[in-house]
Image (cartoon, helix red, strand yellow):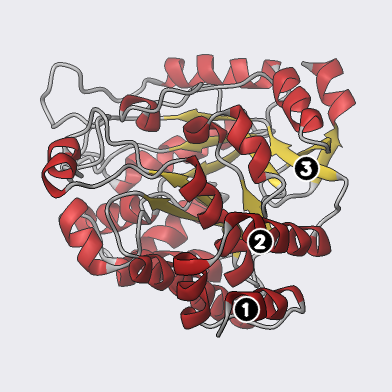
Amino acid sequence: MPVPEILTRARSGKRLTPADALELYRDAEFIHLGAAAHAIRNSQNDPSTATFLVDRNINYSNVCITDCLFCAFYRPPGDKEAYVLSRQEFSTKIEELRAIGGTRILLQGGHHPDLKLEWYEDLLRWLGATYPDIEVNAFSPSEVTHIAEVEKLPLEEVIRRLAAAGLAGLPGGGAEILDDPVREEISPKKLKTAGWLEAMRIAHRHGLATTASMVIGFGESYESRVRHLANLRGLQDESLAAHGNGFTAFISWTAQLDTVPMSGLARRKGIRPAGAQEYLRNIAIARLFLDNFRHHGASWPTQGVAIAQVALNAGCDDYGSTMMEENVVSQAGANTMSSIVVEEMQIQIREAGYTPVQRDTRYRPVKRAEDATASA
């Protein structure tokens, strides 16, 4: 089907097929993609506002045995730079977040071979008791699957116990590209597509907040990207129908390959890093194809401020989060900021043409941006 007809169908609310998405990747011009995606964004969300979240990334440990080729953050067990944060270190970071009006922490680490399920449960209970005003979204499908493997327990039981201990959400990290031939090449030890989807399926069943992510630029084909999006849309259909609870948002960014083990492979295979134009085309196509995702987030940490502002006019309705610290992407080679202050985030959203609105994990307004500034 010709691109103009596909875009017209998308604007009218008709579902695109994988073949339609593939045609858009191959032949659509960004100016037309962006306009269609922006129209759909405005039909599903307030056209005058863009949301943001005040939170903090906390990498509780950098110990990992998965050896992903695109990661420069992890350290093997016993490495002199390996760490697990102490409770005091947690407290310092969370108090800094509270001081700027933050509402959430995002805990992510590696696949630590020695941390037991009880360690994670104790941490969640302590966080809930000590900081009841801070929501805890933590780990990822690959991390909880690793915990289940270490404990030799069903994944369902692990997620159930973590939720009972205070886990409010399971972030969508570790998705990269949900197409197994790609995963076999870039992260052969990490769980495959079916495993990632199953962890999220269980998380939805237990009422956890979840996000869906996508990382492009590993040399994957357009067909692999479409399979990724189709996997997400299919699970979203299933979870919403069964539980009324699915992914809260979709976030995409580009692989940072400058300083990671994969950089040599990328050079040998002639993999061209995904740039700003490719990123913007991807988020626009995702908005058109993922018709059951209301919220789409921009990625200022990997793309920089200017491109993130363009993203708000090409399908995204959310500017992301303050993060306060970001270690994984920045150590992989991203040359943008690793954190952003609330006031600057508000300025950037206004410069893009929107009123900034602070939100929580489930996209409920927390307070208007002017109030957030006053409390920061």
Quadrant of res 268: top left
Mark 1 vs mark 3, CA separation in Å: 27 Å
Q: Which mark is residue 50?
A: 3
Look at 55% across and 22% down and name the residue there: 339
Q: Amino acid at mark 3?
A: Ala
Give left or right: position of 67 versus 88: left
At which x and y percent is residue 145?
30, 58
At which x and y percent is residue 169?
55, 51
On screen, residue 317 above or below 233: above
Look at the image and tell me whether residue 152 can be seen.
Answer: no
Look at 45% across and 37% down and name the residue there: 107
- Looking at marks 3 and 2 on the same chain, the residue that comes earlier in the sequence is marked by 2
Q: Secondary structure at mark 2?
A: helix
Q: Which mark is residue 32?
A: 2
Mark 3 vs mark 2, CA separation in Å: 22 Å
Q: Amino acid at mark 1?
A: Ile
**Front disc: 3 or 2:** 2
Look at the image and tell me whether residue 145 can be seen.
Answer: yes
